[in-house]
Image (cartoon, rainbow, N blue to C red):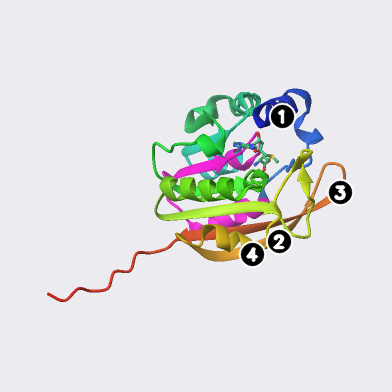
Amino acid sequence: MMDKKEHWENVFATKTEKEVSWYQEYPQTSVDFFKTLQLPLDSEIIDVGGGDSYFIDALLALGYTNLTLLDISGNAIARIKKRLGDKAKFVTFIESDILDFNPAKKYLFWHDRACFHFLTETVQIEKYADIVDKALDKGGRIFIGAFSTEGPKKCSGLDIKQYSMESLRFVFEKEFQLEGCFIENHKTPFDTVQNFIFCGFERKKITKEPTLK
Ligand SMILES: C[S@@+](CC[C@H](N)C(=O)[O-])C[C@H]1O[C@@H](n2cnc3c(N)ncnc32)[C@H](O)[C@@H]1O
């Protein structure tokens, strides 16, 4: 059996962008949510398991210049780098399994569409939540999209974990406050539909009780 890195390297070596179910010409749900936050243009933003999706292109078009794309697949990174050409200078590329990621800086926005849902074991999910906590700055936001409980049980032939608003909230609620969720019926290039849930979270504010002197 292929390990997960081999699986993803193979996908990006053998399939064109429109031959994968997750292809989107424009990541509208993510961009719409992102715009509501009105983050400064120099904010540090990371797209986790970003593959060669157009979220980075959309952020560049909005004027953001401190972008990071993390993906397990070097082939995916090579593909998006080539597409971006000169604009790749605004993006830091990290080829890594998300569970091995040791963030060297603090981000203000963490985006993950259809990467987190491949983590099916509790220890992996808890580790992911820990990494998000380490990586995100004060005021940091998360936007996560996963297959919903009405969606498919597999993605790219691999098992995934489906989510509801409650189960996504449960993963992040120790440090993050749920802001809202959106359901999206993603139309694949094969004319099938995949039901996604996207939820946005904001880091909880530390409220200290005043101390008596
Ligand atoms: C279903 S695709 C989604 C790609 C992109 N987010 C999008 O919306 O088009 C999943 C992506 O996550 C990456 N990936 C899967 N498991 C990963 C892991 N453990 N760590 C980092 N990236 C991973 C894959 O290489 C692939 O690019």
Q: Position of residue 198 (x, y in %)?
A: 64, 57
CA–CA distance in space, label 3 to label 2: 16 Å
Graded by Cα atoms within 10 Å as few (under 14), some (14 to 19) or many (20 or more), the crowding at tag 1 reads some
CA–CA distance in space, label 4 to label 3: 23 Å
Q: Position of residue 99 (x, y in %)?
A: 54, 39
Mark closest to the chain's N terminus, 4 or 3: 4
Graded by Cα atoms within 10 Å as few (under 14), some (14 to 19) or many (20 or more), the crowding at tag 3 reads few
Q: Nearer the viewer, residue 209 or 52?
A: 209
Mark closest to the chain's N terminus, 3 or 2: 2
Please name which of the two marks, 1 or 2, marks the residue nearer to the observer: 1
Tell me which corner region of the image, top left, top right, bottom left or bottom right, holds residue 96.
top right
What number is the disc on residue 165?
Answer: 4
Using the image, determine if residue 21 lies above or below residue 151.
Answer: above
CA–CA distance in space, label 1 to label 3: 23 Å
- Residue furthest to the bottom in view is 212
Label 1 element class: helix
Label 2 element class: strand
Residue at x 66% of width, y 62% of height? 182
Q: Check disc 3 and report the residue beneath it.
A: 192
| Marks 4 & 3, CB-CB < 8 Å contact | no
Q: Is residue 69 visible?
A: yes
Mark closest to the chain's N terminus, 1 or 2: 1
Q: In the image, ligand 1 is in what quadrant?
A: top right
Q: Check disc 1 and report the residue beneath it.
A: 7
Please name which of the two marks, 4 or 3, marks the residue nearer to the observer: 4
